[in-house]
Amino acid sequence: MSINRNIAALQSEFDLLIIGGGVTGVALAREAARRNLSCCLIEKNDFGWATSAATSKLLHGGVRYLENYEFGLVRQSIRERRNIGNAATHMVHTTPFVFPLYNNRSRWHHWRSRLGLFLYDMLAYDRNRRVPADLRIPGHHFKTREAIQKEAPAIHANGLRGGYVYYELQSHFPERLLLEWALTAEQAGARLFNHMRCDEFLLEGSDRTSSSAGDHTGHSASAKTGRSARIRGVCVTDVLTNNTHTIHARIIINATGPWLEEILTESNFPVPSPVTLSKSTGIHFVTEPLLGPDSAYVFALERGTHIFIIPWRGYSLIGLTDEPYNASADELYPRETEVSQLFEDVNTVLADRPLKKEMIRYIFTGIRPLIFSQKSTYNASRKSELFDFRKQGIENLYSVAGGKWTTSRDLAEYAIHVIQKQQSHFHPVQNIDTAREAFVSSCGYGESVRDYRRFVAQQNAWPAVNADIIDHLIGLYGRRFQEVLRIAAQQPDQKLKRIQSESPDVYAQIDMAVLYESARTLDDIVRRRLICGTTGV
C-alpha cells in the first residue's frame, strides 16, 4: 500500500476537494472515500506537518473539558480515543497520569479533583469495550506520598499529600499515525497530494477566480452579482516543480486549521470566512529524562493553568504554554518569552531547579485554531463545527474549524454526512461506520499488538534480523513491517544499519518513506517518517 502522487489524476473532476493535510483533512478524505465519493486532498507542505505534529502525543479522553461542563465533548473524546486506539493498536499504549496534591491547596480543590475523576470514570463506562487487554484503561485511584516520592524524587516533597492517577492513550509517533490514516484514505480510493499549494478559488456566477473577484470587503457574492456564486475548483501550484494545475470539484472543504481565514484573504476571496478563529500558540520541550519512565505528571500552576511532564522514548516531553497569537501561521516560531516561561514553570514545580538549558534537546511549537469565544484560549471550548458559505452567497464551499486529534474521525463523519444530505447530485448516504474499521497497517481492529508480536516471533520468517529491529518496525508500520524488511533484503548489511546510534531507525526506512509514503524532502523523512528527527537527534 502506498500514497501515489500521480499528477495526471488531477485532470479528473472530483466530487470533493479537501484543502489541508492535517488530521482533520485526512479524516475527511477517508470518510468521503469510504462512501464512494471521488475525493482529492491537497496540502501545501507535508501531511501533518503543522498543528497535527505539534501535539502532546496523546489521544486524550477530555478530562479537562469537565471544567467547562462540556459533558458531551468528554463522551465524544472517550469514545473516539477508544476507536482510534483500536484502529491502530500497534501505535499507542496506555500511560498513567499522576496529579500531585499539596497542602497549600484548599480542601475544596482536593475534593473537586476527586469528584471530577469519579465523574470522568462514570462518563467513561465503556472505555474498554472491545479493547485488547494491553490497552485497557483502568479507573482512577489514589497514589500515596511515599509511592510518588519513590517514582519521582525530583518533585517537591514539602507539603505533598499524595496524588490521583488517571490514564490516557499515548501515541508512539503521531505523525506516522496520521500517515496511517492517509494511507487508509488512499486505499479507500482518495487521491492525496502533499506539497501542492492552493492559490486561487474558481467561481462561476460571479467572477472567474477569487483573485479577480474584487477586494475582501465583506460583501457577499450575491450582493455583488445579484445571485449566488458557485465554487467549481481551485488553481494550485506543485511546490516541488513550480508547475501549476487546475483541479475541478463539485464541493470544496477548507480544512486548513490555522490558515482557515488566511487562505481566503490571500486569494482575495470575495466574501469573508463564516468563522473567526481564536489562535494561540503552545510550545513543548523534549529533554533529558526528569522523572521516572513509567508515569506522566500533571502540575497545577498558580495562574490557573497546568503543565505536564510525560515520559516519551526515554526522554521527557514537557508542555505546554498558551499564548494568544495574531500573526500569520506561516511566521510561527518558538518565541523566547514562551520558552522562558515553560523553562521557569518546570523548575517551579520540581525541587532544586533540575532542568538546565543544555538538557533541552528539541523545542517545537504549534497553533491551536479554536473557534472564537470571549473566554481565554486556555478555557475556550474545544468543540468543532462545519460552516457553510451559502449564507455568504457562495455555494458548495465549506470550512471545518476547531478539530482536535482525538475527535477528528467523528467530526469528519458528521461533516461528510451533512454535505451528502445537502447535495442532491451526490450518491445516496451510505451506512458506513468507520468507527470500527482498522487502519490499513493495523494488526486488526481491537487486536492486541502484543499477541501479534508473539505470532511474528513464532513464525520466525526473518531469522537473520535482530528481534529489536522487528519490534521497532512493528511499532511504526504494523503489518507493513515486512515491506521494510523486503527492501532491506536487497542490501541487508547496509539497509539494516541504524541511522543514528541513539535512534532505533534503520536505513531501509528511508527507502520505504520515499517509495511508498510520499516523502519528498529531507524534512518529510527526518521529522515525519523516522523517529530520529522527533527527539532532537
Image (spheres, grey):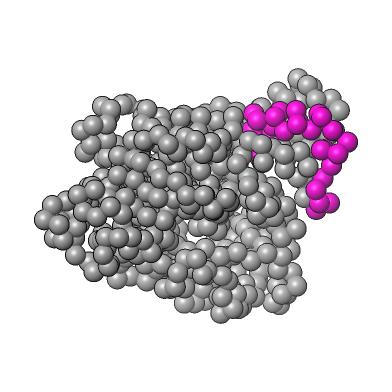
Rendered position, 532 above or below 262:
above
Residue 133 x %, y %:
58, 33
Question: In front: 322, or 351?
Answer: 322
Per the picture, the main secondary structure of the magenta-coloured stretch is helix
Pick out the residue farthest to the right. Answer: 493
Instruction: Specify whether residue 338 is in view.
Output: yes
Q: Residue at x 19, y 57 (%)?
A: 221
* Relative to 449, 379 lies left or right: left
Q: Quadrant of the N terminus?
A: top right
Name the residue at 75% across, 28% down. Answer: 486
Instruction: Tell me: 446 left or right of 72.
Output: right
Q: Which residue is drawn at 41% across and 67% down?
A: 279
Q: Is residue 301 left or right of residue 247?
A: right
Q: Which of 506 and 174 is in front in this view?
A: 506
User: What segment is highlighted magenta in the picture?
Assistant: 474-502
Q: Can residue 181 be seen in this view?
A: no
Residue 6 painted magenta: no
Q: Where is residue 297 in the image (x, y as percent from the top left)?
A: 59, 61
Q: Where does the image place residue 238, in percent across and percent down from the top left?
A: 52, 49
In the image shown, does 232 or 528 lie closer to the viewer?
A: 232
